[in-house]
Image (spheres, rainbow, N blue to C red):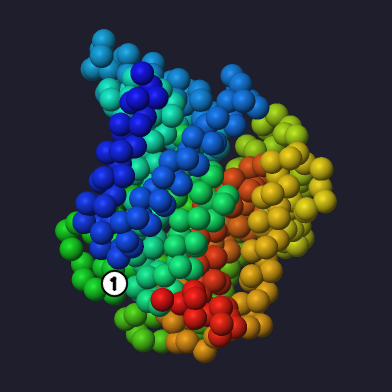
Amino acid sequence: MYYLLFFVYLLVGCYLVTRIPFIRKAGIGNKTIIALFIAKVLAGVLIGWLSNKYNPGTSDYWWINADGWLEYQLLRSDPREFFSNIFRSPYEHYEGFFNSIGSYWNDLKNNIIIKILAFCNIFTRGNYYVNSLFLNFFAFMGSVALYRIFSHIYMHKKRLLIAGCFLLPSTLYFTSGIHKDLVVYTMLAFLCYAIYFSIEQRISLKRILIICLAMLSLLLIRNFVLIMLIPPVLAYLICIKKRWQPWKVFSSMYVLLILGILFVSWISPSISPLQVIVQKQQDFLSLPVAASQLPMPVLTADPASFGQHFFLAVNHGFLRPYPWESAGPFLFPLSIELYFYLFLGACALFFRNGNAEKSVPFIYVSICFALSLLLINGYIVPNMGSLVRYRSIYWPFLLVPILCIIKLPKALNKHINI
């Protein structure tokens, strides 16, 4: 029965992606958009199947889905309890907003997804793969939102944009599972979409609602991602309002940000933003040791500690896993992907085209945001498996500009630029 249900919903999804105005306005042909949607759905099937095969009974993806079925049963038997229990803390307090373990706010990240699954189960009967199809229809819209941003900037790079927004392997894979990554990636894409077109075109009620919903979702599910987006967005607004050169505004913004953090750390270490990073690292280090565990020095909220371990954070955030590390068969292809992206980044530095598009302020938002998150992850995440998963969310923000500013040979450029 579930096979039939999956197939029927897949057909409905393929029909809808060719009819929803938001997707149609992306300007991608029907055959291509259906193929991209099916690729997204298949990635969801693959991550579910592999996680269940190699981590039976312990996979986060499957236990979240199982809890969604329990919440569905609660929704049927006691709706009042269903809608009220999400506001109760089992810890008898509501502290630890930035903590990664042992707080109401940390549990809320999964509880929100579980509640959403409870409603999906009305139509899916709790089947993991059918639920995955439902959530990936939602996540696919996020990829479309990113595509619409970048296609407004790089108007003649359609094939490169499709590759960067829809088909980056680790992004496609990790943002297709029933997990926080799918929601964070999608909400982040919608938030950037609404901010970009509100600034570049006009503010509308719909875009304001998208901004509010996306910000609330990120604040509750992965708050530090929203915090890291604020500085580049502020710099973006200054660039548009003052018409100043983006590189000057963005570099000044981050210099002032660093100086501000140093000043706060000096006058009141207890409220320093660095303390949040230290707490997150401690939360990660308190978890069971992973098979791909990295040696991680313990940070303190002293700026000197962050300076001392800066290059190690760069190494973890940008270079690990190495291709030759024996960290398991699943990490090897992800390592090859990482080093291919580093190669593309080097090409973008030395073989740039002369288009003015690279001076568009939003490109600086995209790149600065992605680089800052990769660095923060290098400071706090002590295992390579989690590093590649978290990193996957930010690859499109970094790779799309890189792909589009590389100066290609004329013969190849003729086939890619359309």
Left or right of 10, for residue 296? right
Q: Residue at x 55, y 65 (%)?
A: 399
x%, y% of residue 99? 54, 38
Residue that extends furthest to the top in the rendered view of this protein? 77
- Residue 195: image quadrant is bottom left
Q: Residue at x 67, y 50 (%)?
A: 334
- Residue 102: image quadrant is top right
Q: What residue type is disc 1 on?
A: Ile
x%, y% of residue 255? 56, 74
* Residue, disc 1: 199
Question: How many numbered dots are placed on residues in this image?
Answer: 1
- Residue 133: image quadrant is top left
Closest to the observer, 312 or 191: 191
Q: Residue at x 52, y 31 (%)?
A: 48
x%, y% of residue 38? 41, 45
Closest to the observer, 27 or 314: 27
Vertical order, 123 against 372 (above or below): above
Left or right of 12, for residue 403? right
Q: Secondary structure at mark 1?
A: helix
Left or right of 403, for residue 30? left
Quarter holding the N terminus? Answer: top left
Closest to the observer, 92 or 194: 194
Q: Residues within 10 Å of mark 1 (few under 14, many from 20)?
A: few
x%, y% of residue 63? 50, 23
Closest to the observer, 199 or 43: 43
Q: Residue at x 51, y 25 (%)?
A: 62
Quarter holding the C terminus? Answer: bottom left
